Image (cartoon, helix red, strand yellow):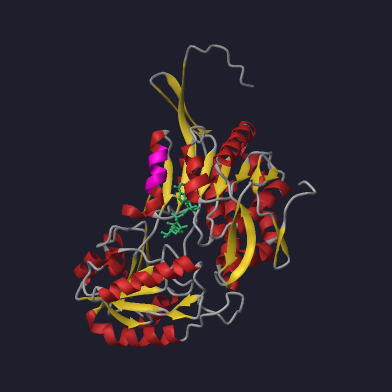
Amino acid sequence: MSAAERRVDVEGVAVSPDHLIGGRRVGSPTTFETRSPTDWSRVLAEVARGDADTADAAVSAAVEGFAVWSTLTAEERAAHLHRLADLIEARNDDIAIVETLDMGFLHESMKERLVARGATNFRLYADLARHHEERSWEARGADHVVQRMPAGPAVVITPWNAPFMLETWKVAPALAAGNSVVLKPAEWSPLSASLLADLTVEAGFPPGVFNLVQGIGEEVGAALVADPRVRRITFTGSPETARHIGRAAADNIVPFTAELGGKGPLVVFADADLEAAAKMAAAQYDDSGQVCLAGTRLLVEESIREPFLELFHRHVDAHVPGDPRDPATTMAPLVHPDHLARVEAFVERARAAGDRVVRGGHRIGELHYAPTLIEPASNASEIVQNEVFGPVLTFQTFADEDEAVGLANSTRYGLSAIVFTTSRSRAERVGRAIRAGIVWANTFLVRDLTAPFGGCGISGIGREGGDHALEFHSDLKTLIIAGGTTVDDRS
Ligand code: NAD
């Protein structure tokens, strides 16, 4: 790192607001501000605003990095990834405070859950890639060997919610499979990615293996995904952006995965543990609903409507919106004033359309939107059909299992679902009938990371998790060697 390198102080942590390209920090002629959701007047950093030249330089560096990285053995790459995980663990507190200030999620959960997951992501993929076996067999008088080839430079584009966790979740399999990476984080929460970039340098990654580019999606993001030297694109964000990226991927015939929004149902049957179900429903407001997997459509069996609502309201009343650094706070602020305005506009449109606002429906101070429950006029209402990505749940009732499944499957999304029932057979039946990438029964967010993860419908294309992400980042080759080779000089 050069002595002249720019660093900004974020609560005692020195963060570079610049790109990392080819192992060096590089600025841009223009910048953009990142502000804190804890206080929107607080500018945390003037971040380098990458352009087409930045994208070109980053992909060039990634091509060079790939030439080195792809020739290492899986074990050598795994050693780097474990070193990186060690460094993330050692810097957990720094990463967590920067992330909390930049993005706004509750600090305790950042430390214990989201940043710690970053280290786990690298360890998981280091170990999986080492044990990713090649298949070989003999057929038709010839040896067949299936080889996994690293695909090439990968572009990783991520959203503003839970940035560190999602970035590491996507970067780890790319690196483990032998690809180099250009990461472009979201412009509303760009800073923790810069700490990750520092740690790749400290962990001794060869230059160009991991590159970080900061900037606006439509500018540098679009330039990155349009570069024909890029051989994989992996994206998490909204369906709208996925359509743009998908067009660029199609132009260059590049595989891409898209982890997109959700409108998950939270289905409560009359036989459920009502207390647990109501508590879980109220917990969907914790991060102000800025969670793709959130169960935002409450579907409750008609016969338990009143007891469920009573328990639900009691849990929601206990929520404490506040500063995410305060351990007493249970409800995070919204990430950005534009996002708060977007959430508010959704609720206003719902009101105007005749949906009934049962609770909330207003701001709390400058940073929060009240936990809001809406009983829609019909299942076709916009508030039921589109992702709000804020603290807004809808409430509908059903008469029987068939109606519950019908309602659960009635949006274009299909990311996740939560079901509450004490019947094992119903959990299986309903779980199998729901069209979603993941269905939880009587729990939420618990998941072995080797399980497939992704969405149906407009919630996404492809699957992450375990070997699925490693397969995505590899090109398979079938090598066939006939008996004509007479000299066995392999030893
Ligand atoms: P977004 O689509 O607006 O932006 C995501 C990223 O794409 C950002 O880095 C942005 O700069 C970049 N981008 C924007 N336009 C681009 C373009 N033309 N070319 C290349 N890159 C471009 O999404 P967001 O508002 O940051 O995130 C919220 C969305 O992400 C929600 O829909 C949420 O459900 C979804 N999400 C999904 C998952 C999942 O795992 N399925 C996880 C978290 C968030």
Q: Is residue 167 magenta?
A: no
Q: Is residue 467 visible?
A: no
Which residue is depicted at the point 34% across and 69% down?
346
Towards the viewer: 4 or 389: 4
Q: Is residue 2 left or right of residue 484?
A: right
Q: Quadrant of residue 478?
A: top left
* Residue drawn 59% across the image and 59% down it: 33
User: In what quadrant of the picture does the C terminus appear?
Assistant: top right
Front position in the image: 401 or 241? 241
Q: Position of residue 469 (x, y in %)?
A: 48, 46
Task: Give the magenta-colored segment's residue range.
Answer: 243-249
* In the rendered image, the vertical position of residue 152 relative to residue 91, given as above or below: above
State left or right for residue 446 relative to residue 95.
Answer: left
Residue 367, above or below 33: below
Residue at x 36%, y 70% (from the top left corner): 345
Q: Number of labelled discs?
A: 0
Counting from the top left corner in percent of width and height, residue 381 is at 25, 68
**Can residue 33 be seen?**
yes
Where residue 17 sits: x, y (%)? 66, 54
Compared across the picture, whether 403 is left or right of 27 comes to: left
Judged from the image, the quadrant occupied by ligand 1 is bottom left
